[in-house]
């Protein structure tokens, strides 16, 4: 189990645009970013990332959530494993 302070550090560090852009090419549109959804096959981008809200949402397949949920879905990881993945990305030591 990861302690609450470490989880809070990971969640603070994990910026949604930074996390998603490792896997999806994003283009700025207004205050949000759009791209092709990595969860289903599409030709026109229905995948939106909102840095202000810290979430992603696909209007094609309906998937959405924050940085941890994106990693869970994309990498097929559990919540715990996704937190550890993000901790490695941001160089945060995980205290269990």
Image (cartoon, rainbow, N blue to C red):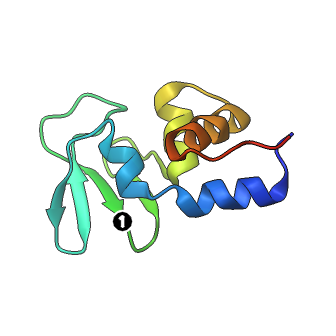
Q: How many marks?
A: 1
Q: Give the residue displayed 65% in from the left and 42% down from the top.
A: 83
Q: Give the residue displayed 63% in from the left and 54% down from the top.
A: 10
Task: Indicate the position of residue 23 as horizontal and vertical percent values.
Answer: 32, 35
Q: Is residue 22 left or right of residue 67?
A: left
Q: Quadrant of residue 57?
A: bottom left
Q: Is residue 26 left or right of residue 10?
A: left
Q: Quadrant of residue 60?
A: top left
- Up-down relation of residue 38 to residue 50 (above or below): above
Q: Give the residue displayed 74% in from the left and 42% down from the top.
A: 94
Helix, strand or loop at mark 1: strand
Between residue 73 and residue 84, name the one nearer to us.
84
Between residue 92 and residue 65, name the one nearer to us.
92
- Up-down relation of residue 93 to residue 85 (above or below): below
Between residue 54 and residue 94, name the one nearer to us.
94
Between residue 76 and residue 15, name the one nearer to us.
15
Q: Give the residue displayed 67% in from the left and 31% down from the top.
A: 81
Task: Indicate the position of residue 36 as horizontal and vertical percent values.
Answer: 22, 40
Task: Please name the residue that numbered disc 1 is placed on.
Answer: 50
Task: Indicate the position of residue 75 as horizontal and vertical percent values.
Answer: 50, 27
Q: Residues within 10 Å of mark 1 (few under 14, many from 20)?
A: some
Quick one: quadrant of the N terminus?
Answer: top right
Task: Indicate the position of residue 30 as horizontal and vertical percent values.
Answer: 17, 74
Quick one: quadrant of the C terminus?
Answer: top right
- Up-down relation of residue 16 to residue 84 (above or below): below
């Amino acid at each position: 189990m990861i302690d609450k302070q470490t989880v809070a550090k990971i969640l603070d560090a994990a910026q949604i645009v930074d996390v998603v852009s490792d896997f999806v090419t994003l283009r700025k549109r207004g205050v949000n970013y759009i791209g092709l959804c990595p969860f289903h096959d599409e030709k026109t981008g229905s995948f939106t990332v909102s840095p202000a809200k810290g979430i992603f949402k696909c209007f094609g397949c309906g998937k959405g959530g924050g940085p941890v949920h994106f990693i869970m879905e994309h990498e097929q990881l559990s919540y715990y494993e996704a937190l550890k993945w993000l901790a490695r990305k941001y160089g945060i030591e995980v205290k269990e």
